[in-house]
Amino acid sequence: MKPELRREIRDLGLVGAGAIPGALLRWKLETIAHSMVEGSLRSVVGADFLANMVGCLLIGLVIAQGPGRARLALAVGIGFCGSLTTFSSWMLELAKALRAGDGLGAVGVLLASLAGGVLLVFVGYALGQGLQRRRPG
Amino acid sequence: MSWLAGDTDALMVAIGAVPGAWLRFRVVDHFEPVLPRKHWGTFGVNVIACFALGLIVGLEESCGAAAQRVLLLVGTGFLGSFSTFSTFSGELRAELVQRHWRSAALLASGSVAGGLLAMLAGLSLGARP
């Protein structure tokens, strides 16, 4: 087998192997979030919000490891985090709030995810750098 | 694996997720925010996914066209996996770290505006006339 083809198959395998548990966790969070969060917060802190926040923290950790950890980036970063997090469901929540005339809810959905996501990437990156410093060599 | 109760549903999500992630992997320049075409990959992927999700949700609302399992396969599995929030936030962080305030503001507002417009277009196209 040509080496390029073998690398291609390996890359796709790593991405796919991360994508399946990521998507399944996001799907399962729907049930978990519903039992965890009560009342009016439900519209902002839904399953997709939780999935997005966890994914942002984790991708910060991965980015901090640098370009040398290619397999980690493929399986955990692109596969797992990319599939766990979702942009389209976030926009669906926003559109639903707007269509219901819930302006305050729409602003809440928008800002909570936007600010929370970037903040958690920063936190994950700082944690990831701390991990790297501990690793010998 | 008892947490995967409803195995066919889980299978639908998993089968949709893999090609979604592969396609995104090929389109997005991951971890290379210095390339000239930097954020267009993520932006494009997310806007397309928003339009498509809006379309199937709109169709579902207007005529109940899609079965529950189709929504799991295409909506939760494929499109949820295809679109990404973590790379978007990672790119936003990269712009902020480099103090490219205008690029960061443009990336955030452009992605939200583009995604929301695509979502609304999909929803209204799927709605019964």
Image (cartoon, rainbow, N blue to C red):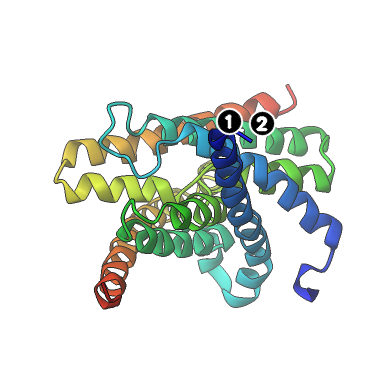
Q: Is the residue under label 2 in contact with that under label 1 (CB below 8 Å)?
A: yes
Q: Which residue is mark 1?
A: B51
Position of A133 with respect to B109 (left or right) is: left
Q: Residue at x 28, y 76 (%)?
A: A136
Q: Residue at x 24, y 41 (%)?
A: B104
Q: Where is the C terminus of chain B found, in terms of image quarters? A: top right
Q: Residues within 10 Å of mark 2 (few under 14, many from 20)?
A: many
Mark 1 and mark 2: Cα distance apart in space: 6 Å
Q: Which residue is mark 2?
A: B55
Please tell me whether mark 2 sits on a helix, a strand or a loop: helix
Q: Where is the N terminus of chain B found, in terms of image quarters? A: bottom right
Q: Is residue B76 visible?
A: yes
Tell me the amino acid under the disc marked 1.
Phe
Circle 2 marks a residue in which chain? B
Q: Nearer the viewer, residue B63 or A77?
A: A77
Position of A91 with respect to B8 (left or right) is: left
Q: Residue B106 location, x and y as percent?
A: 27, 34
Q: Residue A102 location, x and y as percent?
A: 49, 50
